[in-house]
Amino acid sequence: MKKNIAVQVDDLTVAYNYKPVLWDIDLEIPEGVLMAIVGPNGAGKSTLIKSILGILKPIAGSVSIFGKSYEKQRHLVAYVPQKGSVDWDFPTTALDVVTMGTYGSLGWIKRPGQKEKKESLEALEKVGMLAFKNRQISQLSGGQQQRIFLARALVQNASIYFMDEPFQGVDATTEIAIINILKELRKAGKTVVVVHHDLQTVPEYFDWVTFLNVKKIATGPVKDIFNDDNLTKTYGINYKVSIQE
Amino acid sequence: MDITEYFNLVFTDYTLRTITLGTAILGAVTGMLGSFAVLRKQSLLGDAISHAALPGIAIAFLITGAKDSNVLLLGALVSGLLGTFWIRSIIKKTHLKSDTALGLILSLFFGFGMLLLTFIQKQPNANQAGLDKYLFGQAATLVESDVWLMAIVTGVCLFVLLLFWKEFKILLFDADYTKTLGFNTKFIDILITTFIVLAIVLGLQTVGVVLMSAMLLAPAAAARQWTNSLGLMVFLAAIFGAFSGVFGTAISSSQNNLSTGPVIVIVAGVFVLVSFIFSPSRGLLFKQIRFIKNRRDLELHKTLAFMFHIAETHDNISHPHTIKILNNFQGYTKGTLQKLVDKHYVTLKGKKWSLTEEGYKTASNLYNQQNDNDE
Ligand SMILES: Nc1ncnc2c1ncn2[C@@H]1O[C@H](COP(=O)(O)OP(=O)(O)OP(=O)(O)O)[C@@H](O)[C@H]1O
Ligand SMILES: [Mg+2]
């Protein structure tokens, strides 16, 4: 049975200055996969996610979510940015940041109430950060900040999740905690797209993978396409990651 | 006139009351909005806006030939907004760093403004004198209608701030994410920036082009030191700004011939200084005190932990040991031992010490806590 297409990207080309950093990308992400985007630094992984989410305006190409334009389907999509993209010295608490995930469904002007607070507390609990709910965010460790970002996306209760390096700088325990949450999301039928750097763990964590380096090198099931050939094409050097069975 | 005399006069003297009210309101509104500039790390923004306003003042004068402050400020508003949105588009279109764009517009507009001022001064027109008060400000020229205007703008600003509080907060923290939630970030951004321009333009007559950005930054920077809540920060910044206005006016009018603007800015600077030193969580003083205290606690804990280890080897925790065995342990001093006795963690009998029940409990908790933190 053919799966639904959650995200469809057609002919996407993005440039910051003159030279495109993403070149003519076609990408289909089936519903319900846990997908890794891999590629070297500067390959355009963050740029791809930002373009799909409408943060960046592409020179050409289009994006559709479940067959409709992204603008119409925005409420189905949640985003976990790269942790370094915000100032963590901002005067606010962990709970407050997580509550921001509810702002989208609230819309303009309306303030979060009891319902939103309850949802945010539940999300904090899910990522194991409930005890830190009133902590000023600068007083959290890097891994804890990452979990707060994850909780903020969970609260959005979306169908598709885009996460930019959620494992960056987290210890083994947190990494396992996070991957378990992602696997739970998949079990619930959600689509999860993760920028990932640790090639060793790709076969263990993900069932779908996209190789990216300015152009799309390959995309598909991990068991079919995660091989030395594609890794070499993407990273430019001879790669030997033997997949353990 | 000394300060107490001033405070008596504030309630009776019309002019003094007007000026005091004006500077207080101005301080409050710039402090409030300054919080946003500080949190967006746009410290130069205030400077750029106030300098960009100068040519507008000159041009408004050249066109109307009148020195009506409302007309001149309207000119300032137009050129301030023009400069600000020019900066925005430069940053967006050219990928210049934002401080480069700010600096560029600042010097360009200010240079042009100064050129126009010199030109005006050379005109054979008796009316031209006094335009340079917009450079350093002259609070004494404030009249009741100016204060009303400030109050109305402040009121509207407060209303908008409360209305769009959630949107402002999330935009300040994470603009990209805000966009993905479907908010029009450009609209929110323009709203904040427009109010910052308005507040700055309102302050030009009182504080002047050159010092205006200090009014924007100082109260907010001071307020940031005292709280970790955005709401409280904005509130405190408004209070600090208002007090700077009042104290500045009080000091300058009780010392003859001190111009008000610079004194207000100095008072605001004192708020910053005091805040950076004395704030309990972020201040330099308490940081140092905490550091010393932590170091002392550490010695105590190390000694207690060492004793705990020894005590653990015996069935009876309060089995007495000689003090001598502590001697080859690093953290140990007579002072720390005495402190442990004072805290009833340890009892001394002659040359022998033993752990008390309480000491044993504290020591084992010490370990548990450390394990918790490691997780
Ligand atoms: N704001 C920007 N302005 C100009 N160029 C940019 C900007 N952001 C990224 N780039 C360039 O675009 C390219 C792709 O960047 P991107 O951040 O998408 O890479 P990435 O794959 O996410 O890398 P990393 O693994 O380091 O996060 C890089 O060459 C980078 O230099
Ligand atoms: Mg990236």
Image: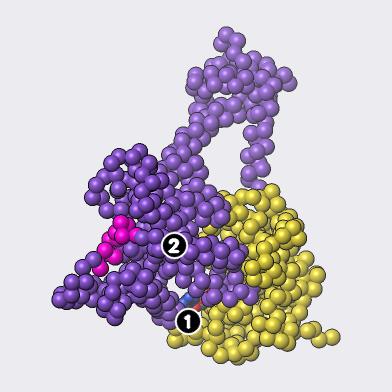
Chain colours: A yellow, B purple
For the residue pair A244 and B288, the one nearer the viewer reads as B288
Q: Amino acid at mark 1?
A: Tyr
Q: For mark 2, name the chain.
A: B
Mark 1: is the Cβ under 8 angstroms from ligand 1? yes
Res A16 label: 1
Give, as a single range, the part of the protein colored magenta. Answer: B131-142
As for residue B133 lying within the magenta part, the answer is yes
As for residue A42 lying within the magenta part, the answer is no
Q: Is residue B268 above or below residue A61?
A: above
Residues under labels 1 and 2: Cα distance?
47 Å
Res A192 label: none
Q: Is residue B141 above or below residue B255?
A: below
Residue B358 makes an appearance in the image:
yes
Q: Amino acid at mark 2?
A: Trp
Q: Residue at x 15, y 76 (%)?
A: B124
* Location of residue A178 in the rendering, given as x and y in whole percent from the top left corner: 69, 61
Mark 2 burial class by Cα count in 10 Å: few <14, some 14-19, many 20+: some
Q: Residue at x 60, y 29 (%)?
A: B305
Tag 1 secondary structure:
loop
